[in-house]
Image (cartoon, helix red, strand yellow):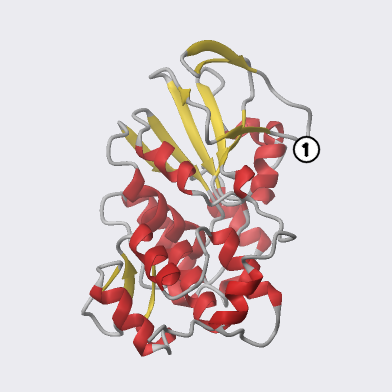
Amino acid sequence: MAINITKNNFIVIKTLFEDKYIAKSSFKNKKLLDALLSCNSVYLNGSRPTQVHLNDEKALYGVIKSNGYNINSLEDIEYFINQEEKPKSRDEVANDYSDTKRVESKSFNGLMIAVLDKLEVTFNNKIEYLYPTMPGSGLFLHYSSKLELADDVVVVGVENPQVVWKIRKYKHLFDENKKYLFLSISEYKTNYQYTWLESFKGEYIHFGDFDLAGINIYLNTILPRLKICKKHSFLIPENIYTLIKEKDYKKVYSKQIRFENIESKDDTNLQELIDFIKNNKITLEQEMLSN
């Protein structure tokens, strides 16, 4: 018998996809959790409180589809969640997803990027050049294209797309003698984006919000994709502690409690930032670093 996956179930699944783990207590649908565990799409960490960790995205989507939901991406999940305040039945969702009037977002499967200076790249096996765009805009590369970078190009993964579109406001944070490609890693959460990162061999810098949620994205979503890159780090400006204290965003920290167990065992500088945020219970959004 098919499992009825409600709106609340999909909200939990969406969080699992985004954060890579979630408290087991959040999974109210035991039948669904058992199905996910049986196909190894998730696993339990065994600690207290018990957490459900994402193991295989394709297998998880497979469970959803096998129960009658034509859902293949985060965009599909968000579409379902936003349809109604009341949960829909499996049959109602099936009808929704066969509706030809529904707008598909597959065309946005790709990379949203920007550069500070003219940058030579290999695009579809040919030498091409990327150029800075006008403020408030970026360059979108569809997943059907192929982008390759020279070994000396540093990829900067940016948590908020608005920063990518206005990257010149943040130029002072980066070494003027290096070559950079800025990649939005939040607005377009697509499989291609992560697949491309998995193939990247150069240096990666993560430019996120200075809060536990932003650090969690780096540690649990991005780092697992960077197995073959030569170097990776979390961007920590020299004056960040002064700026965080000046802004004193305590209200924002109240939403960070579920990430208080994160730690960085291999990066002492990042662990120092984590400890500072926890001890002072304040945060800072990356937009505050604009010049």
The residue type indicated by label 1 comes to Gly
The answer to which of 149 and 57 lies nearer the viewer is 57
| 34 left or right, relative to 15 | left
The answer to which of 242 and 30 lies nearer the viewer is 30
Residue 232 vertical position relative to residue 174 in the rendered view, above or below: below
Residue 262 percent across, percent down from the top left = 36, 66
Give residue 184's quadrant in the image: top right
Residue 141 percent across, percent down from the top left = 59, 32
Q: Residue at x 57, y 44 (%)?
A: 109
Residue 138 percent across, percent down from the top left = 69, 34
Q: Residue at x 42, y 17 (%)?
A: 150
Q: Is residue 290 visible?
A: yes
Give residue 17's quadrant in the image: bottom left
Q: Residue at x 62, y 51 (%)?
A: 187
Q: Residue at x 62, y 71 (%)?
A: 80
The answer to which of 225 and 127 lies nearer the viewer is 127
Which residue reaches farthest left?
46
The answer to which of 170 and 6 lies nearer the viewer is 6
Report the label total: 1
Residue holding disc 1: 136
